[in-house]
Image: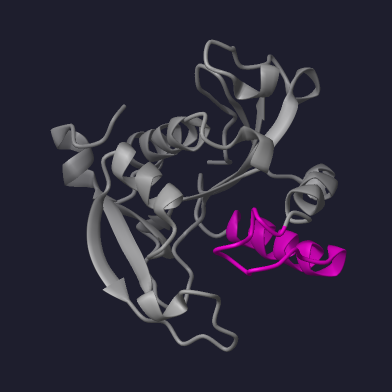
Amino acid sequence: MPQPILRTDRLLLVPLADRHVDLEIRLDSDAEVLRYVFGRARSRDEVMASHAQRMALGRKVDGLGYWMAFGRDGGARGSTAPEGEDDGEFLGLMMLPPAHGPDQPDDPTVAELGYRLARPYWRRGLASEASRALLRHAFDSVGQARVIAQTMTVNVGSRGVMEAVGMRYVRTYFPRWDDPLPDAEQGEVEYEMTREMWAAGSGTP
């Protein structure tokens, strides 16, 4: 099952493709967007390498991968999703790959939820809206057993999204950093949504 195009009230989520590389580069050119991920902007070569890794992960488990989010009117409340990506503006990158990090299980039934919005579109509820659609896809279409999300403990914005979509706190952990970011001493947090939670209505469909 290839990754499908997904729609929400305000967003069109298009599976990541090679034609989107320049948009990824633009997104990662803002150091503030990557504050809790890399702590700096990334070079074109770094983004190209990440793009190749994302495309490979998108082929690992049918239906999982990465989506580019497009909207109208900056994704303002009350706006509607564009018919196609050429009819909208690029808002960010939404992520639902198989779990693959060093502090994640090696289990094809576990996916990792993530989101990266361009700064002009923050605090509009877009990450939560996209995350609900990805959770629905993970459980109702792909059949995942569990979806996890991880971020720095101090990243209150990202944690707010995890809580808003019904995920529950699992743990705080302390990964091994080669070059620790500011506040790394407070560790990272992991949240989860299980199939049972989703079926019981803990998720926000």
In the picture shown, does residue 30 fall above or below 13? below
Q: Is residue 96 left or right of 80 when viewed as pictured?
A: left
In the image, residue 91 lies at what x, y percent? Answer: 67, 34
Q: Residue at x 79, y 44 (%)?
A: 23
- Report the front residue among 188 and 104: 188
Residue projecting furthest to the front: 182
In the image, residue 3 lies at what x, y percent? Answer: 57, 40
In the picture shown, does residue 147 fall above or below 80? below
Say whether residue 72 is visible: no
**Colouring of the image:** one colour
Q: Residue at x 74, y 54 (%)?
A: 30
Which range is magenta? 31-59
In the image, residue 15 lies at what x, y percent? Answer: 65, 39
Q: Is residue 113 left or right of 199 when viewed as pictured?
A: right
Q: Is residue 199 magenta?
A: no
Say whether residue 127 is visible: yes
In the picture shown, does residue 80 fall above or below 121? above
- Report the front residue among 33 and 192: 33
Q: Is residue 56 magenta?
A: yes
Q: Using the rendered view, name the quadrant where residue 4 is placed.
A: top right
Q: Using the rendered view, name the quadrant where residue 191 is placed.
A: bottom left
Q: Is residue 114 left or right of 136 when viewed as pictured?
A: right
Quadrant housing the C terminus: top left
In the image, residue 32 lies at what x, y percent? Answer: 66, 56
Q: Residue at x 72, y 20 (%)?
A: 84
Q: Residue at x 32, y 38 (%)?
A: 164
